Image (cartoon, rainbow, N blue to C red):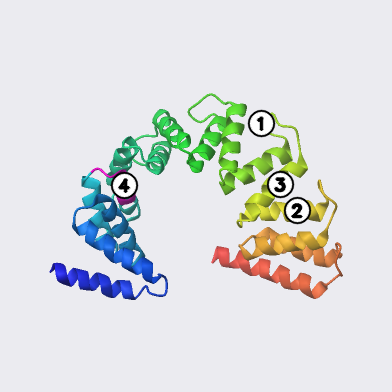
Amino acid sequence: MELEMQERFEERLQQLRHLLTEEQMLEAKNIYQLAHEKNVEAMVELADIYRIMEEYSLSVYWLQKASKAGNSEAQYQLANCYYEGLGVEEDIEMAFSLYKKAAKNGNPDAANNLADMYLNGEVGNVNYKEALKWFEVAAKQNVVEAMFTLGIMYEQGIGVNRDDEKAFQYYLKAAEGGDLDAQYRMGSIYFEGLLGRERNVPLAIEWFEKAAEYHHIDSIYNLGFLYENGIGVERNGKKALYYYKRASLLGDYQAKLNIAYIYENGIDVEVDKKAAARWRELAKQQKQNEYN
């Protein structure tokens, strides 16, 4: 049976040759052997390989073994499997239990997910106190999603006294750590002059551009809007079209209408009624598809 499993593993590995180098192929075979020799870290790595192979039940099998051995990363990943119903029947309570175990064992991503579950009341009642506690644990270990959520909690006074300065500092840390929603929020804060900050459109644009670089749709749309209307920058219809078209490709309905408007009115481009009509039709089709 064990020989058959190994042959099956190597056969599936061969199917991934186009994704892996020879060195990686050899390393995968080595990981397989180490996992069968009860090396816990290798078990987690083997589970990752099986997930790439889309052998989800085998991935779960090795995560369960590593989890029982106390590995927090395995506990976290196994919780994800139960949460998503991947390779195992969906079980939110089991996911919660494993996130809690992994979080207590020091896994920062598990702490963040556990906090989310407390915040949303996914198992039992909403518990803001526990949510805050575990978001803070995750944030201290540089989980940017936790920092962003703490920003929301302090800005809106969710389970805590509202504190604009704390909200701003959490948003800033998350944005500096690369969280796209936080970068967009920083742009919005400076654009609107929120959380005790003075309005600063050039700084807002800097943050929108950071998020837009990684395809954050609202940031891309906002840049188009600023250039179309000359807010904080010199009006530039061509640049507005560039950003609106990017937002449109990502599914933004309003961007399509704005493109039509620019072509209809010749904002820094030649008037093009045909192009305007085409973009209005695309917007119309999108709206119809949303309702169908």
Q: Vertically, is 2 above or below 221? A: below
- Callout 3 secondary element: helix
The stretch in magenta equals 70-78
Q: Main secondary structure of the magenta part?
A: helix
- Checking the image for residue 195, the label placed there is 1
User: Is residue 86 in view from this perspective?
Assistant: no
Residue 72 is one of the magenta-drawn residues: yes
- Checking the image for residue 92, the label placed there is 4
Q: Earlier in the sequence, mark 3 or mark 2?
A: 3
Looking at the image, do the residues carrying marks 3 and 1 touch, with CB atoms under 8 Å apart?
no
Q: Which residue is mark 2?
A: 225
- Callout 2 secondary element: helix
At label 1, the amino acid type is Leu
Using a 10 Å C-alpha cutoff, classify the residue at mark 1 as few (fewer than 14 neighbours), some (14 to 19) or many (20 or more). Answer: some
Nearer to us of marks 4 and 1 is: 1
Q: CA distance from mark 4 to mark 2?
A: 42 Å
